[in-house]
Amino acid sequence: MAGLFAWAADVVGGGPLEDDDKPRKPVPLLLTSQQTHYLSELDVKAAALQQTVQVLRQRVGPGAQGFAERMPHLHADSVASQSALALEVQAHNATRIQIQMREDSLRAENEAYAKALAGRQDEAREKAQEAQELQTTMQELEEKEKTFKSDLEKLRAAVAEKDGLSIQEEVETTASDADRDTLLQNELRQLRSELDMWEVKVAKLEREVASAQQTASRWPSPAQREKELERRLRNLTEQLVTKQAQAESLANERNALELRLEQLNESRRHIQATGTVDGNSKRNKIGRPSTSHHSGDESKVRGLPVRQRASKSVSDNVANVARTMDAFSLHAGSHFWRNKLVRSLTVVYILCLHVAAFIMLTGRMHRQFKPATAKELP
């Protein structure tokens, strides 16, 4: 572009072409015929170009000099405009990048706002459902209050009717009917007590309605309700564990009592066989409390023969062993129910025992069946 402007200025101004009118000095050259012909053609072309240049200068006229002077300024202005255009393009690209980044950030914010709005809408739905449930409970309480009020009005009407009847009867009857007056007074007292009781119930219901309204205003959150349910579940599990421990202890006591009953039956059979103890001593022996068990057993053992003493001592030892086993089983059962690891290990141990027994039995069965099959083969 700059070269084009310079060529146009040279053509219009006629700077370097002004020397064409000067006489040229011939240069002695040795040329061939073809080269001289080519030079003559070039001279013809140069003369034609000079004529066209002169024609162009005549057409341009006298204002060409000012145009030639303004050409460098136009070139500088074009360069400045090109640089400004490049700066504007760079600024436009930077703003476009910023706009794209801002659009991405706005999209992310819109997504976050949409998620938050969905969460708030879910919470609002839950709150609306809770409010609807509270409204239904309030309506039920209001209906109960209306029924109680209607019952109270009926009772008041009945009391008023009975009061009127009692007044009429008192007017009609004589002063000598003291018994009837006492009966009526008792009935009035009963009715008044019932009326007071219904008034107390109505006041209680009003308090319940007020407390329900207060709870509706400060309804607990789902997290608090979940904590309360977990606490109740924990308490119930603890109560279940204690009840199971109590049931196990009762079962152990029952087993101990059954064992004791069997021992007493055996001793009674021995006593009936020997005939040394009468029926009264047998009844006293069966009905004695467990606190005096050892002293009574010692006295009975002294009164028995030698064989019966040995059997009695063996039965006492068996009873002591049974009591210790019951106590140990009670302690082990309570520990078993409290510790989950012990339960899991016990289950695994039982399964291992079953597997080992199954393997041993299958091996023995194979050993037993192999000789039989060997005998049958011949």
Image (tube, rainbow, N blue to C red):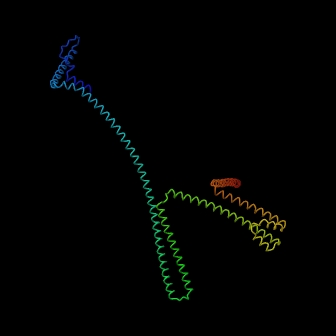
| Residue 111 percent coordinates (x, y) | 41, 48
Asked if residue 194 lies left or right of residue 43, the reply is right
Question: What residue sits 68% from the left and 62% below the top?
Answer: 249
Q: Quadrant of the C terminus?
A: bottom right
Q: Quadrant of the N terminus?
A: top left
**Which sits in the foreground, 47 or 158?**
158
**Which sits in the foreground, 12 or 343?**
12
**Which sits in the foreground, 159 or 87?**
159
Tell me the quarter of the picture where residue 315 sits: bottom right
Question: What residue sits 46% from the left and 61% below the top?
Answer: 217
Q: Is residue 136 above or below residue 166?
A: above
Question: What residue sits 47% from the left and 73% below the top?
Answer: 149
> Could you tell me how many numbered marks the image carries?
0
| Residue 3 percent coordinates (x, y) | 26, 25
Q: Is residue 264 above or below residue 241?
A: below
Asked if residue 306 lies left or right of residue 219, the reply is right
| Residue 182 percent coordinates (x, y) | 56, 83
Residue furthest to the right:
306
Asked if residue 7 lies left or right of residue 107, the reply is left
**Which sits in the foreground, 82 or 301?**
82
Residue furthest to the front:
175
Examine the rendering and report whether any part of residue 377 can be seen.
no
Examine the rendering and report whether any part of residue 249 can be seen.
yes
| Residue 264 percent coordinates (x, y) | 76, 68
Asked if residue 241 lies left or right of residue 324, the reply is left
